[in-house]
């Protein structure tokens, strides 16, 4: 399927969904405060942006999202690669990972408040936990999946040192898997942002809770779409960078 046809079908599906939503919301079957029609969103955005609220909330969420993304990604990839390269390290942390991996990021909220207070650092900490585990396990799998024959060929051509093999073979071979984990982390981070802001940290999540308390559901939907837009933009940029990094594979 050509990219143009794929984009057309995607746009058609989204348009059909919005039309269906608008129809149901205006049919009278559901109260407007329970399901606002999407046609109200432009006016809601104009109101929020006119008061400076939308810009402030989005910028606040972007700050701790970016910090959490960087910390979780860097630590996850670095430790994942180290664990995959050294069997003794892998064995020593195997049970530790099994103990902490099932604990959801939201379970760390009490400790985040105790350690960092109600601050952006606490939100970034919670976001980084969810992103860390995705990158950690995808990096381990990506490095372990590198063809061992390629390593032997590299040694035959004189690349015998650990760092030479790491730079010439292991990291390039594991790059597609590592980048897939980083991309998944982009979405995981936005999924955690709202929850990380529920205990009073300024941002999109806090604004959504305020609006829901006032039954301003159109404001809640506006910020839901704002998250979707922010993720879409970040994912698009990441894919362009990923294609450039992996251009050598073509």
Image: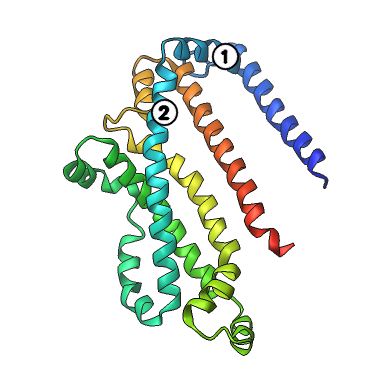
Residue under the image location 37 percent in, 49 percent down: 128
Instruction: List the single residue furthest toward the front.
Output: 158
Corner quadrant of residue 91: bottom left
Label number found at residue 160: none
Relative placement, left or right, of 208 versus 164 is left
Q: Is residue 143 above or below residue 115?
A: below
Residue closest to the eye, 175 or 220: 175
Relative placement, left or right, of 25 versus 196 is right
**What residue does disc 1 label?**
42
Instruction: List the single residue furthest toward the bottom.
Output: 156
Residue 189: where, in percent of width, then height? 44, 44
Q: Is residue 163 above or below residue 8?
A: below
**What residue does disc 2 label?**
59
Mark with earlier residue (2, 1)? 1
Residue under the image location 50 percent in, 32 percent down: 227
Residue 215: where, in percent of width, then height? 39, 15
Residue under the image location 34 percent in, 18 percent down: 213
* Residue depth check, mark 2 versus mark 1: number of the one nearer the observer: 2
Q: Is residue 190 above or below residue 136?
A: above
10 Å neighbourhood of mark 2: few (<14), some, or many (≥20)?
some
Secondary structure beneath dot 1 equals: helix
């Amino acid at each position: 399927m050509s990219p143009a046809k794929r984009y057309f079908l995607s746009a058609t599906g989204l348009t059909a969904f919005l039309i269906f939503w608008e129809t149901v919301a205006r049919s009278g079957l559901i109260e407007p405060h329970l399901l606002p029609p999407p046609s109200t969103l432009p006016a809601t955005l104009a109101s929020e942006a006119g008061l400076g609220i939308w810009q402030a909330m989005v910028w606040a969420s972007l700050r701790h999202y970016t910090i959490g993304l960087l910390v979780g990604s860097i630590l996850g990839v670095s430790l994942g690669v180290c664990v995959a390269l050294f069997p003794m390290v892998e064995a020593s942390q195997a049970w530790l990972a099994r103990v902490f991996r099932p604990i959801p990021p939201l379970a760390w909220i009490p400790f985040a408040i105790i350690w960092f207070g109600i601050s952006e650092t606490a939100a970034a900490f919670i976001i980084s936990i969810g992103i860390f585990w995705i990158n950690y396990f995808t990096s381990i799998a990506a490095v372990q999946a590198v063809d061992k024959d390629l390593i032997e060929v590299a040694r035959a051509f004189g690349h015998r040192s650990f760092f030479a093999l790491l730079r010439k073979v292991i990291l390039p071979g594991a790059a597609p898997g590592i980048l897939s984990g980083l991309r998944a982390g982009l979405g995981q981070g936005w999924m955690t942002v709202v929850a990380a802001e529920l205990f009073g940290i300024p941002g999109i999540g806090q604004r959504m809770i305020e609006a829901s308390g006032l039954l301003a559901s159109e404001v809640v939907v506006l910020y839901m779409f704002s998250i979707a837009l922010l993720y879409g933009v970040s994912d698009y940029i990441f894919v362009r960078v990923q294609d450039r990094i992996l251009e050598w594979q073509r």
